[in-house]
Amino acid sequence: MTNGYPRFFKNLTLKRLEERIHGDLNLSSTTSLVLAPSKKSAERYKSFIEAVHHPNTIIRIHETVPNVCYAVAFPSEHAQTAKSCFQHCGDVVSSRRAERVLDHISSSSSSSSSSSISSSSPTFRANTITSLKSKIHEYYPNTKIFLSPSGMCSIAKALRASQLLFSANKPGKVVVFGFPYLDTLKIAKHPQLSPGGYVFFGKGDSSDRAAFAKYVAQNPNEIACVVAEFPTNPLLHCTDLKEIANVLEQAKKSSGRTIPFIVDDTIGGFSNVDLRKVGEGAVTMITSSMSKFFNGNCDVLAGSLVLLNSDLEGSLSPILAQDDSDDSLFFEDAEILLVNCGNYEERQQNINNRAIGIVKYLRTLEGEGGLVDKVYYCDDSVGVYDSLARGESTDGYGGLFSFTLNKERIDVENFYDSLRLCKGPSLGTNFTLCMAYVMLAHYDELDFVESEYGVRRDLLRVSVGVDGKGGDEGREIIEVFREAFAAAAV
């Protein structure tokens, strides 16, 4: 492979920049680099590597371009640790940032005068960030918004803030409710990112809800934060966030302490769900990957954190502001995102309509002896989802669904190969995208997730786009599915 998903795979531009900086710094072959978008993110890389290995490990931070790019030099034998931080903290240097830094280094080395990283004025760049925040404010007005270079970075930022709020010295536990996206759980598991440990209620069923309520009631002063997705990825389960919030409210009454409640709404989306409806002050922070449906074009990596109005707002706001600046999201990425999100609501509604049409078709094949074993989609939790729908009524259930096939009637590998859709590890793209999610995300723990949480290894996840000529009901995509079923029949 020459390229891949940005947090899992360094793109070619980023590699060229690393090689250039490595040479300019005259580093030895036993020293490697990881690039960071800000000084504070560089310091996080340094602290992360030191914590895993030894505080006396020689790690140096080099300012490549002030406030734009920093190089963290470390012993090459720690490369896997740096990669883990790159992947899970989400402090990623984008390809646009890398390209501009390369241009800047090249022009500076060939000229006696220093060149600017951009021809845009500081005012223009600041206005771009303000305009992007204003777009999010259309959905969550009168809130504080913090931008990041990736959605995962926003989640990590929320967890760091929660830990600092909990205690500067003693870390608290991260409680994860529901089976979430792979790296959200990995952050909670990682001792360097969640030093107080984690508690996982991964099934999200009635038994887990009872166990969660008991745990919170007994340990309110041991919990740094509670994390959930709405809906979950890839099972599209809609956790009853009001029930979770009620448990936290009861804990507050008994302990006098408010536990931060973090909800990631990447799958639900700004235009589909309004998490203020969980209750006044119930959800503390909303994290989102704006790379997905909000962007659509699959050409920008970005994240946001919305700090809702709650009794923790005053305490968390300065912590989040000091964690890193909005400049960690490169302004050129913000410019592209601002253009792409201009038709976000229209695209999302189109995707909603197409997705429900495809899901309805697949459900006609569901049941005993059918071609499909199970379809996972948000409309399974109509009451819970609808109670949080933006506006007075539900306009749709989003563009993501998953399904499993009846292996007695369908050859799964043949079906996947025959399905004439783009394949790859992302979602929210304007083109319909299919992914063998569990095989890719949980390859090293297939038996565990299948036996413990019922997440089958052959589960396929589909992100519906706006491609095809089938109109709002996704008829052309349905025909693609019909062809694959016919080709893979046993």
Image: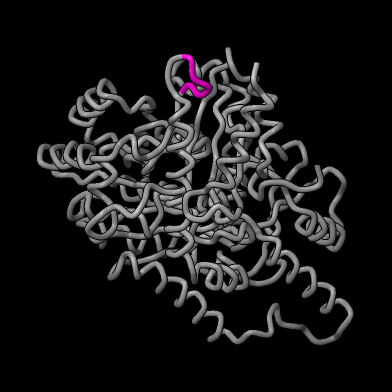
Query: Is residue 280 among the parts visible in the rendering?
Result: yes
Q: Is residue 30 depicted above or below 94 in this figure?
A: above
The residue sitting at 44% across, 35% down in the picture is 180
Q: Is residue 469 depicted above or below 185 in this figure?
A: below
Count of numbered labels shown in the rendering: 0
Question: Quarter-wise, where is residue 252 in the image?
Answer: top left
Q: Nearer the viewer, residue 50 or 408?
A: 408
Q: Is residue 79 depicted above or below 290 in this figure?
A: above
User: Which x, y percent locates residue 367?
Assistant: 42, 20
The residue sitting at 34% across, 39% down in the picture is 379
The part of the chain drawn in magenta is: 369-373
- If the image is split into quadrants, where does the C terminus sit? top right
Q: Nearer the viewer, residue 62 or 392?
A: 392
Question: Quarter-wise, where is residue 53 in the image?
Answer: top right
The residue sitting at 18% across, 44% down in the picture is 257
User: Which x, y percent locates residue 320?
Assistant: 39, 60
Is 456 within the magenta? no
| Image side of residue 141 versus residue 462, left or right | left
| Image side of residue 43 versus residue 220, left or right | right
